[in-house]
Image (spheres, rainbow, N blue to C red):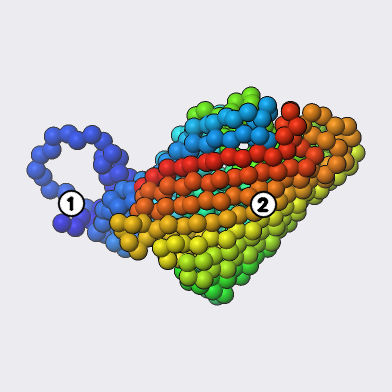
Amino acid sequence: MLIKPTPFSLLALGILLSLPAIPAHAGTVTTDGADIVIRTKGGLEVATTDKAFSFKLGGRLQADYSMFDGYYTRNGNSADAGYFRRAYLELGGTAYRDWKYQINYDLSRNTGNDSAGYFDEASVTYTGFSPLNIKAGRFYTDFGLEKATSSKWTTALERNLSYELADWINDNSGLGLQATRVIAGSAYLSGSVFSENNNDSDGDSVKRYNARAVFAPLKQPGNVLHVGLQYAYRDLGGSAVDTRIRPRAGMRGVSTNGGSSAGDNGNRVVFGGATASADLWDDDAVWGVEGAWALDAFSVQGEYLRRTLKADQASNDVEADGYYVQVAYTLTGEPRLYRLDGARFDTIKADDKALGAWELFYRFDSIRVEDDNITSSTTTRQVGDARARTHTLGVNWYANEAVKISANYVTASTDNASNTVGDDTGDGVVMRLQYVF
């Protein structure tokens, strides 16, 4: 039977469906709105047939286990970690056709903090100026292909090493405004301004500006050509901001939340930058390029970024750059899906529901940090440019649309950075069980 609701009945219906079963009596429900459709595949979704209103409750659970040694631990001995990388409860939908809302909360507390809340996203998007979309609230600012891709569908379990050179470029701590547009079915543009949870001496928040432009003349599954540019800038004058570059080198378990980690034995060397101290820096800027090509079951992608942290009272600027190259192949023949709106890759959908889809990949990452403010060596950081390289080999099994099981082997090597016993190489294995709904 089709039911016609009022706009606000959708929210009430979603709440009622989440309650325990209670005795019910026969009766009649009448409304004066459009017909509705209820879907339970991939979460609970209630929507009107005219697409003016919708309500969807979903989520993702990523349970990780890792083992690592050498450079990844301070004493070089083997350690392990079991933790929830993400445990999101996600609520989103449409109101009055042109208004989209999304609220994702991280129950694992790997995203956010006590003072700002553990939100992955809390935003409202207006689509009435189509093809221009305007988003406001808390979200990840747009920078890079791999960051644009949902954590559910990134090929490697951790995003590339170069992002750790400037983690602020696509951070979500604060509030912002972003405009995006798809042009002529082959280009994607985005620009945003974001108010960080950092202030200068006058109490004025640090403002972050991001811009990204992508050209994708080929965008069909198994036939993708993607090239892009991006830039991010923030003025740090008079502010005290933590600018330390402390890469985990693909091994989140050395220091994480949501469960156990290596604790005090986890090794995260400071490659450059400094803890929060007022007036050390003038401004911070990052630019980057990205590219991808996919043909049937094969894909290759890569990104390069360069950061310049301009000195104020610090003696010298900090320069850093990094890149990665990744190749992937689906053994069962399925292509990676691609979406121009957001300029990002999506999931792999298995053709054989019993076998699922099997994907192999290899990624090489390299970063370099030049910080001439470091004038004397310590136990873990020697004078000179610090470098790190990782090789990641992995397999992903897309068992079905809800379950993905992954395993990555990561090996790292460094220059002018080590653990406390002098190890500059390390190995680790990470495994993940993911369930999305």
Residue 378 appears in which quarter of the rendering?
top right
Q: Position of residue 55 (x, y in %)?
A: 35, 50
Instruction: Give the answer, above or below, for where 134 lies relative to 235.
Output: below
* Circle 2 residues within 10 Å: few <14, some 14–19, many ≥20: many
Left or right of 334? Residue 288 is: right
Q: Tell me which amino acid carries mark 1.
A: Thr
Q: Residue at x 24, y 59 (%)?
A: 35
Q: Secondary structure at mark 1?
A: loop
> On residue 177, which mark appears?
none
Q: Residue at x 18, y 51 (%)?
A: 30
Left or right of 304? Residue 377 is: right
- Whether residue 261 is visible to the viewer of this picture, yes or no, is yes
Instruction: Give the answer, above or below, for where 2 lies relative to 29.
Output: below
Q: Position of residue 388 (x, y in %)?
A: 72, 45
Alpha carbon separation for disc pair 2 and 1: 59 Å
Q: Residue at x 54, y 65 (%)?
A: 299
Q: Residue furthest left?
A: 26
Left or right of 194? Residue 261 is: left
Q: Position of residue 32 (x, y in %)?
A: 23, 56
Q: Are marks 2 and 1 in contact (CB under 8 Å)?
A: no
Query: Label 1 belongs to which residue?
Result: 30
Between 233 and 94, the one lying in front of the other is 233
Between 164 and 412, the one lying in front of the other is 412
Instruction: Give the answer, above or below, for where 361 lies relative to 103.
Output: below
Q: Secondary structure at mark 2?
A: strand
Between 434 and 27, the one lying in front of the other is 434
Q: Quadrant of the N terminus?
A: bottom left
Left or right of 272? Residue 61 is: left
Q: Tell me which amino acid carries mark 2.
A: Asp
* Circle 1 residues within 10 Å: few <14, some 14–19, many ≥20: few
The mark lying in front, picked from 2 and 1, is 2
Query: Label 2 belongs to which residue?
Result: 365
